[in-house]
Amino acid sequence: MAVVAFTRDSVMSRHPLGALAALLLAALPVGAQSRLPAIRTLGPITARSAEPLGAVSAAVPLPDGRVLVNDVLQRRVVMFDSTLAQMSVVADTTSATANAYGARGGGLIGYRGDSALFIDPASLSMITVNPKGELTTVRAVPRANEIQALSGAQGRPGFDTQGRLIYRATPRPRAARRDARPVVGNFVMPELPDSAPIVRLDMANRSGDLASRASDTVAALKINRPDVKVTQGADGRISVNTTVHPMPSLDEWALLADGTVAVIRGHDFHVDRYKPDGTATSSPKLPFDWQRLDDDAKAFIIDSTRTAMEKQREEAQRMMANAGGPMAFMQAGGGEMMMSAMGGGGMGGGMGGGAFVMMGGPGGGPPQRGGGQGGGQGGGPNGGRGGQGGNGFQLPPINLVNPNELPDYRPPFLAQAALGDLDGNLWVRTTAAPTGDGGAIYYVIDAYDTVSDRVQVPQGRIIAGFGKGGVVYLAFRDTEGRAFLETVRLR
């Protein structure tokens, strides 16, 4: 679908009611934009961490340009100076930090007063990291059943300007219909949800402690309902099969610097904003080059996705072998994401993005003709290599929908596509085909719902976080499987 650009001069000169049309154009909302800025490469890279990491899942800035990094593969939180040359360990699994990092991959989110919170799923606790990079207060998480959401498995949680914690909660399956037939024995498959709430949890009382638990639902997101089938064979063995849709139409969300929750609607690509004071606004449709998918294109996407996912499945199998089995692999940090991506449950349940997106990391989406794979950090969320086998454990095979079940137009974005920077901008990773040898292309949307910039991250990079003044932190994995943190500027 082509985007047609109109200017006031062209309308007035070509239409008999040009003056009236020009007035109508002038009355359009500020976000009504017809022309897009040219795509440019994000960078240049100004710094790279001197020490390699296991896997970078989040970067949170501290005063003076220092930055905290959650290294989920090596189960530690580290702090770099502003040049990324000096690194110190804040939390790990050794006695030096009192074993502050648990047996599972945790989360790291910015907190008030230039501090951060480390979310430890193993102990169901939140540990404050002060501006000096020191571990201080330890508190219980507000809701134990939402620990994976608080760890960042369903978008990046954070705090608004009033100290309220905002995150995408995990939807609960609905009770099965009365006429539903048992799947196995007396078990009836519940109805899986197709939407999820964004929750705002009031965690601060007058003394500033994380005490009260008042909450409200900010908005609802359309998510990808997984197609899960449970069967029982003649030998009595139970089988669970999940069919993956590689490019579903869904919504995504991000918390912005002023506490606004931005929800990007996938069906028509517009932005709903829910402000801290309770007011809401809705933007016009954002301009996008909607690409029609014919039968050949749909078949190509399914075949390419299956090939890519099978490679990642093999990589996951090798990683489990290196770790000593599936349980050791999961406890090594981030393993749950790979397991759930393969249909094995875990923290990705109901996430709404499909296994392909989770497996490839926050990349550029399904394969494009002539464009190759989207971004990402190599073979799955944690990269890595290894031998064969996994103590006899085998990941399930990949099931994909039929090509005719794909949409007629490529969705503008996929799961985990939205981020908010510290300067008030909304970043949306689009499915636009990469140009040249670059990575994913992001829309940078300002407070007026205008696409102020379109930037392409360098190949093999994902955005790990933001600093003030246009600083962007990128995660990069080299050909040897080592991960690094890099710094670039938006402008």
Image: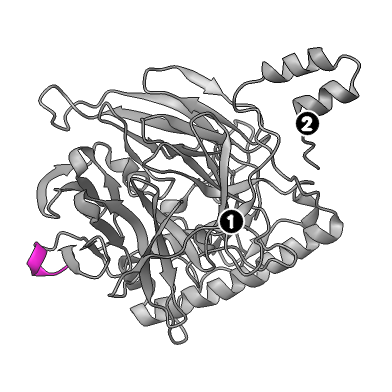
Residue 447 placement (x, y as % from top left): 48, 31
The quadrant the N terminus occupies is: top right
Q: Do we see residue 339 in this rendering?
A: no
Counting the numbered discs, the total is 2
Res 232 label:
none
Precedes in sequence: disc 1 or disc 2: 2
* Front in this rendered view, residue 188 or 30: 30
Identity of the residue drawn at 13% across and 70% down: 94
Helix, strand or loop for disc 1: strand
Above or below 188: residue 244: below
Please check the rendered image and state whether residue 96 is part of the magenta-colored stretch, yes or no: yes
Dot 1 alpha-carbon crowd within 10 angstroms: few under 14, some 14 to 19, many 20 or more: some
Which residue is disc 1 drawn over? 40
Instruction: Say which residue label 2 marks.
Output: 6
Residue 396: name its quadrant: bottom right
Q: Which residues are magenta?
A: 92-97
Which quadrant of the figure has residue 10? top right
Q: Is residue 264 visible?
A: yes
Identify residue type, mark 1: Arg
Q: Nearer the viewer, residue 431 or 19?
A: 19
Residue 419 location (% of width, % of height): 45, 45
Left or right of 123, for residue 422: right
Given the image, on which type of amino acid does mark 2 rest?
A: Phe
Q: Residue at x 39, y 65 (%)?
A: 335
Q: Position of residue 449 (x, y in %)?
A: 55, 31
- Asked whether the residues under the numbered discs 1 and 2 touch, taking CB atoms below 8 Å apart as contact, a structural biologist would say no
Q: Is residue 61 above or below residue 4?
A: below
Residue 108's spot in the image, x, y percent?
28, 51
Are there few (<14), some (14-19), or many (20+) residues within 10 Å of tag 2? Answer: few
Q: In the image shown, does 433 or 171 lie closer to the viewer?
A: 433
Q: Is residue 135 highlighted in magenta?
A: no
Separation of residues labelled 1 and 2 (CA atoms) = 24 Å
